[in-house]
Image: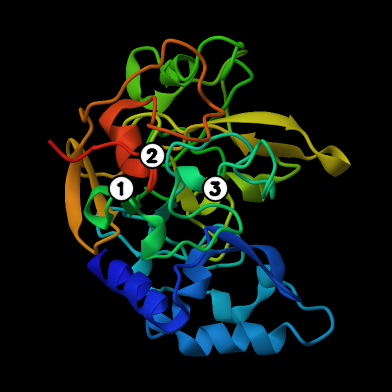
């Protein structure tokens, strides 16, 4: 993970900003992730240039591009047993390292720049927002930038660490995020519920959305991001809605980092340091719904405060 942090800093030296969590690359894709932008700073310039060259050929698609296949060592966590295996679709390279969206939840996969729904200030790597060190007034040593995930092993992965649950009970208008914390299968705490209220993400009409960490280049939250709303190693939870062409689309939800380490996860801070964060880190359930919070201190305690680069908190690791 330290190599990932070094790549971020080298990118900043070259571009005077960090990459956005999701951004548009004309002619390639409008959901490219910040990790793709870092390839030249991970000794992966050949992959980066090959994709740009291939994109100029008629019929180009990222899904079948050979330059996106294989293994990229800098992106793998040794504790993730699946990370060094080909991805579930077309053998694409996996990525165990996720970029922080902080405590921003609403419209995390939608470009809402400048609107009343803009969550850009709530995390380091948000949609179409290229922050610099000047955009971290809370301090780079107190701001989370990246962490880890257990990548999805199979479509319909039922593990709390590696799978994802969809639920329409994620928000009842008053309480959030407690419904997501109830997503563990009763009697089987390492497994997700799969019933009338919570169902394991595995829809065949758009399965790509549910391959956590299987598309390193994709900038959507479910593929390459995490939030600092619920504690590490709690269930990943998204609210589904009917998208175009019958697809089930995902728009928002708490996606905490997770790992196979005992008791917590490794977290990279914007000063380049990597620290172990316990599952029991201080966090708060707000007294009322706060999923659309845009400014000010995080309502989610220390863990939430570490995710915001400009929330004005004095949050630090205990």
Specify how the rendered protein is coloured: rainbow
Residues tagged 3 and 1 counted as in contact (Cβ below 8 A): no
Q: Could you tell me which quadrant the C terminus lies in?
A: top left
Would you call the spot at circle 1 few (<14 residues within 10 Å), some (14-19), or many (20 or more)?
Answer: some
Give percent across and percent down for residue 252.
59, 34
Of residues 133 and 162, the one nearer the viewer is: 133
Q: Which residue is mark 2?
A: 311
Residues tagged 1 and 2 counted as in contact (Cβ below 8 A): yes
Q: Which residue is mark 1?
A: 138
Q: Secondary structure at mark 1?
A: loop
Asked if residue 154 shows in the view, the reply is no
Asked if residue 275 shows in the view, the reply is yes
Q: Could you tell me which quadrant the N terminus lies in?
A: bottom left
Task: Write the residue at 38% across / 86% down.
Answer: 43
Would you call the spot at circle 2 few (<14 residues within 10 Å), some (14-19), or many (20 or more)?
Answer: many
Give percent across and percent down for residue 255.
46, 37
Task: Write the residue at 87% across / 43% down.
Answer: 245
Q: Which residue is mark 3?
A: 120
Q: Work out how far the residue at label 1 is from the one at label 2, CA to CA, in angstroms.
A: 7 Å
Give percent across and percent down for residue 28.
71, 74
Please indicate whether residue 141 sits to the left or right of residue 65 in the image: left
Q: Earlier in the sequence, mark 2 or mark 3?
A: 3
Q: Secondary structure at mark 3?
A: helix
């Amino acid at each position: 993970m330290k190599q990932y942090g070094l790549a971020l800093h080298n990118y900043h030296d070259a571009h005077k900003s960090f990459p956005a969590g999701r951004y548009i690359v004309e002619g390639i894709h409008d959901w490219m992730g910040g990790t793709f932008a870092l390839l030249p700073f991970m000794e992966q310039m050949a992959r980066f240039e090959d994709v740009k060259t291939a994109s100029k050929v008629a019929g180009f698609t990222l899904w079948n591009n050979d330059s996106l296949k294989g293994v990229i060592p800098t992106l793998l966590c040794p504790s993730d047993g699946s990370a060094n295996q080909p991805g579930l679709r077309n053998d694409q390279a996996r990525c165990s390292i996720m970029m922080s969206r902080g405590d921003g939840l609403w419209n995390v996969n939608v470009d809402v720049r400048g609107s009343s729904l803009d969550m850009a200030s709530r995390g380091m790597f948000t949609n179409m927002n290229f922050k610099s060190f000047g955009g971290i007034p809370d301090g780079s040593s107190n701001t989370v930038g990246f962490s880890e995930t257990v990548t999805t092993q199979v479509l319909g992965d039922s593990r709390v660490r590696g799978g994802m649950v969809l639920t329409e009970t994620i928000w009842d208008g008053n309480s959030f995020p407690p419904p997501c914390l109830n997503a563990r299968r009763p009697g089987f705490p390492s497994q997700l519920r799969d019933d009338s209220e919570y169902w394991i993400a595995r829809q065949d009409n758009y399965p790509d959305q549910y391959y956590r960490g299987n598309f390193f280049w994709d900038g959507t939250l479910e593929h390459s991001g995490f939030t600092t709303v619920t504690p590490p190693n709690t269930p990943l939870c998204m609210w589904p809605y009917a998208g175009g062409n019958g697809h089930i689309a995902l728009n928002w939800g708490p996606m905490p980092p997770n790992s196979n380490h005992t008791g917590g996860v490794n977290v990279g801070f914007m000063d380049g340091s990597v620290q172990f964060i316990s599952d029991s880190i201080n966090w708060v359930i707000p007294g009322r719904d706060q999923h659309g919070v845009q400014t000010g201190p995080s309502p989610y305690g220390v863990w939430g405060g570490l995710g915001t680069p400009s929330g004005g908190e004095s949050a630090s690791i205990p």
